[in-house]
Amino acid sequence: MSSDKRVHPKVTEAKELMESGRMSRREFVRTAALLGVAAGTAYAMAGLPRPAFADSHGNMPFPADDPNAKEGGILKVAMQIQKVEDPATFSWVEMGNQARHMMEYLAMTGPDNVTRPMLAEKWEANDDLTEWKFHLRKGVMWHNGEELKAEHVVWNVTRWLDADLAAGGIIGLSTYSAMLEEHDTGEKDDDGEPKMVKKMIPGSVSADGDYTVVFKLKKPVLSVAEDCYNYPTAICHPSFKAPLSDNPIGTGPFTLAELKVGEKCILKRVTKTTDGKDFVYWGGKVYLDEIHYYNFDEDNQLVALAGGDVDAIYEFGVEQMELAKSLPGKVLAAKTAQTLLLRMQVDQPPFDDPKVRAAMTMAVDNARAKALVFPEGGSVGENHHVCEIHPEYFKLPEMKRDVDGAKALLAEAGHKDGLEVTIDVGNTDGPWHQTLCEAVRDQLKDAGIKMNINVMPASKFWEIWDKTPFGAVAWTHRPLGTMVLSLAYRKGVPWNETHFDDPEFEAALDDAEATLDVEERRAKMEKVEKILQDANIMIEPLFRPVYTMTSEAVNGYPAHPTQYHQFNKVWKS
Amino acid sequence: MAVTETEVDVRSVPLLKRLTEPKVIIGLFVAMWVPLMLYVMFGKYIGNAKDIMLLPAYPATVILYILGVRAFRESWVAVLGLTLVFFWIFMAVTAPYLPLLDPNKPIAPFTVPFTEKRDIFFWLGTDFKGRDMLSRTIWGCQRVLVWGVTATAVAYVVGTAFGLIAGYLSGWWDEIISFLGNVLLSFPVMVLFIVILNYLGPSGFNIVIAVTFASAPAIMRIVRGLALDIKTRDYVFAAQTRGESAFWIMVVELLPNVRGPIIVDACLRLGYTTVAITTLTFLGLGLQPPDPDWGLMIKESAGTAMLWKFSYMLIVPALSVSSLILGFNLLADGLREMSLRD
Amino acid sequence: MFKLIGRRLIQMVLIMLTASFILFVIFDTPEFKKRLAIQELGGFAVSALDETTYNEWLEKKGLNVPFYQRYFNWMGNTLTGDFGFSYEKNRDAGPLVWEKLANTGILALGVFGLMIPISLILGVLAGMKEASLQDRAVSFISVFFTSIPEVATAIILTVVFALGLGWFPTKSAMISGFSFHELILPVLTLVVYDFGYVARMTRASMAEVMTSQYIRTAVLKGIPYSRVILRHALRNALIAPFTVIVLQLNWLLSGVVVVEVFFEYDGFGKLLLEAALFPDIEVVQACTLVAVAVAVISQIISDVGYTFLNPRIRFG
């Protein structure tokens, strides 16, 4: 958008960084887009070729129209079918996928991890990133014929932040937590402490005219636009009443025709508004007539594809790769920051001895373990939970496997004759958890550590995941490296499963989080990553890729790192 | 148990007549079974003794098999059944000493049978993780055999005890036990298994409990019927007039006499239990990975090998488990045939 | 007779009460409530909840109500035909169970339609001449097929007919409506496992009849052999198999679990397993009641049918 009157100073700054070689071109595109520069323009500024989906024709978030595309047809997708109650409290990605083509978002993060305008045509922030203005597209039509207005968005945000709704998935996002403050309810809890409740700070979201929404945050947040595309933040019509499936009014091209949880979810194109007018979709051409989701659990999705029951699937596991390759169709992979931590609790024997933990990590060559489990794709982990695809990732010196060193440490720690430990594994996203543990076990054996693998059903594992002294826990993809560190390694946070407690680490992390410049932040991440790596609280061999597959007939099917479905420009030949 | 010392009424247990040296056989059985059971159930706690533990079981198995074939030689069905069962028991006790690859070690994924990869010839190929199928198939029989037999045995102990009490004491005891038995029997077995294992969590020991709940009522009914019949016999009256306690009479007079008729039933039930364990493991409620088991092999391959060229991963464990169950059923059939002839 | 039926029905109600009570006790434990929360909210979200929020969640779901009160409410509702609500499928449990039961009914119809003629014919052929070659062959075939567990049969049939020959689809999810084609493999699997048992029962019954006095007399009288078999022997020989076949209904409700799961067939067995694992308490309850009812009623039918068919037997 070269016509833009004002370019955020951070963009200029970032451009300088890029030009002086201190910021990668891709990283620049991402940052610029987050600050409101249209993706196409950002790619141009970076001097990068514009990928098809980066095109800003009419400032659309979707890929460009394909001249060969055939209109019509039904896309059948194998996925687990969940209930669709209230988007704000969605707890699974599948729920988000079922609703995504009905209820849309202010912004949209593409498969390339770049966030583009969706219901908002652009946004801008003040210099210290505490006030954000989202300018809505004009002429976006609800399924009931009304036009989308700023007050509708304000209604949504206010609703998300209502304590009674308990929209945990939303208020955990930094944008929205920066709009909340603690209030004393006047009541006391069982321990006599005052009962606190989080309430929205008055005025933190407001409408400025019909088409501008203003967010006022109590601290600077960079990822506001990305936080507008997390799956619970779909914009609903103010007439919304849970369950959504009863009367879905959205702005998307499709609406729900039939939902049977555990069986199917049928979406059909909206042609008429509920008051009888022709429905005009704001987002340009949409090729498919219908989207059918059919319930298949992950093990059976590929078989359903092979049998011709469906055209595409939600996901298949790495152990099915050989099967997938043997089938006709397109295998798609996306790089993610999804990972598995073989994490130890620092206050539980034998892991309360730092030497034992050091011996454990020292005895494992992460790259070798990764190569065994995910020979293709993914990235090697470095025991600090920051992935190379994170913008602020700092490359620490390479870790070396040292079996003799590990043995020596074990002997010092009083385990001269070896050590026996048991890890709890729940295979919560597939049997690869167990495979990875087995690969680690075989390496630990060389150092005289016998690791028993206690496999339990996922439902049992979820009861103990944060309680077991030694467990293999999966963490999902988050766009920034600091996000997960804050959630998992600060003292007293609910997900601190390792019981890690280091004020120095928290200070370093605070420092990094307050630094908006990615380059500077990266420099500060060195200390953060180093402290965590040296604490040896986890063996983190890899970040995994996610795989999906479609039949030959499906075109333009996106492989998104968080498995979000965006089918506007998908067509079947 | 003191039971073996008491005089056995051979007329009611014709099958045992064929086994010429019961004490020797029981000794051999113990030598075969106890090490195997300890090895599988408590292998974790045994440590280095594990390596030599199964050595005595190995000759015991061979001798038992020879004695068994001699005793049952008149029925080829029984001999065939015995052969199948002992083949797998033999595999179970010798698995650690056979020149096999580590069953849990990934080597070369998706190697089809009879091919060579990484300088290793794979007779039955490898699975999706690259683990040797031959080795997994052979090791896989250990757990299902041990847990299956243990579960059946426990079910028999419980079922027999309640059956004797219900049959001999009658009255309220009978009413209550029979009612509880009926409650359990009117559940479809799988419902019972699913509910129990889902509550207790999947593991070998919990399978024993679940199988006991599912099988003991039926056993109880059989034993109760037998006990009702036997308690009218003279020698029971004699014992009663001697002033023996009810417990004594049940254990010493009744128990040996109900033993014979339930042997055939036991063989059949071993088959059912094996089916149940495999099925439950396939459904994710039974034995847990990583150690090999046929049901697990099926479960793991069902999602990864649904293709003609990889179907060996499914076929091999399916055939293995079928052959073991066939063994139990044929043995039961042969024994029944012989006992009818007597 | 009516006394017998009445007694059985009373027993059924007692059993249902006991069973539902035990299930309620099991599923009322905090662990199961936690598991439900994990299913609804996700494992990470649940461990981030503080106690108050968790209790609020329980309250919203109606799970914090004292156990006995929930049980009595549930009993009252069940009596009025309301089987409660499925947390997993987000709809009323009653219609859900009936719908899946109907699907399993279709499967059962196929199984019985195929299994009854096969096993009766084989059983009669074998029982006609005891110890003959055909008897031994049928016996062996019966034992052989009964020894292959359903999961193994399902695999072998799938590998041969779906993966190898490509005649049938590998799964029977029937996502585009009912398909006879997709029904064949699950039906075959169940028939292969079950026919042997019924055939053996028929054989035993037939063999017994053939040794009876009146058949011997009939043969000695010079009545043609085929007529003896068809007119005299069959009628009596089929009484025992009848009761066995009716009792197979009960077995079928167990047997279908693994077959439905393997073939992704949307029936009662799959529903039951999913509900138990979820844990979807009211669906498990409804399924159990149905299962117990099927078990007891099939028992009654088999007893009553037996008395009708066999005038020599009278129940007290």
Image: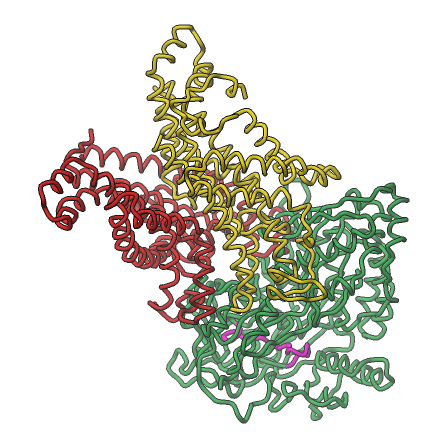
Tell me where residue A65 sits by quadrant.
bottom right
**Picture coordinates of residue B186, whole percent (x, y):** 36, 39
> What hue does chain A carry in this figure?
green
Q: Quadrant of the N terminus of chain A?
A: bottom right
**Picture coordinates of residue C114, whole percent (x, y):** 29, 57
Left or right, C100 with reference to B100: left
A12 or A154, which is in the foreground?
A12
Tell me where residue C161 sits by quadrant.
bottom left
- Per the rendered image, the range of residues in magenta is A100-116
**Hey, which residue is sitting farthest top in the picture?**
B242
Left or right, B107 with reference to C118: right
* A16 relative to A334, above or below: below
Does residue C290 appear anywhere in the picture? no
| Chain letter, colour yellow | B
* C123 relative to C215, above or below: below
* C142 relative to A282, above or below: above
Q: Main secondary structure of the magenta part?
A: loop
Number of numbered discs visible in the structure rendering: 0
**Picture coordinates of residue A22, whole percent (x, y):** 86, 80
Does residue A29 appear anywhere in the picture? yes
| Chain letter, colour red | C
- The verdict on residue A112 being magenta is yes
- The verdict on residue B292 being magenta is no
* A485 relative to B329, above or below: below
Q: According to the image, what is the colour scheme of the structure?
A: by chain
**Picture coordinates of residue B324, whole percent (x, y):** 50, 47
Q: Residue at x 52, y 40 (%)?
A: B148
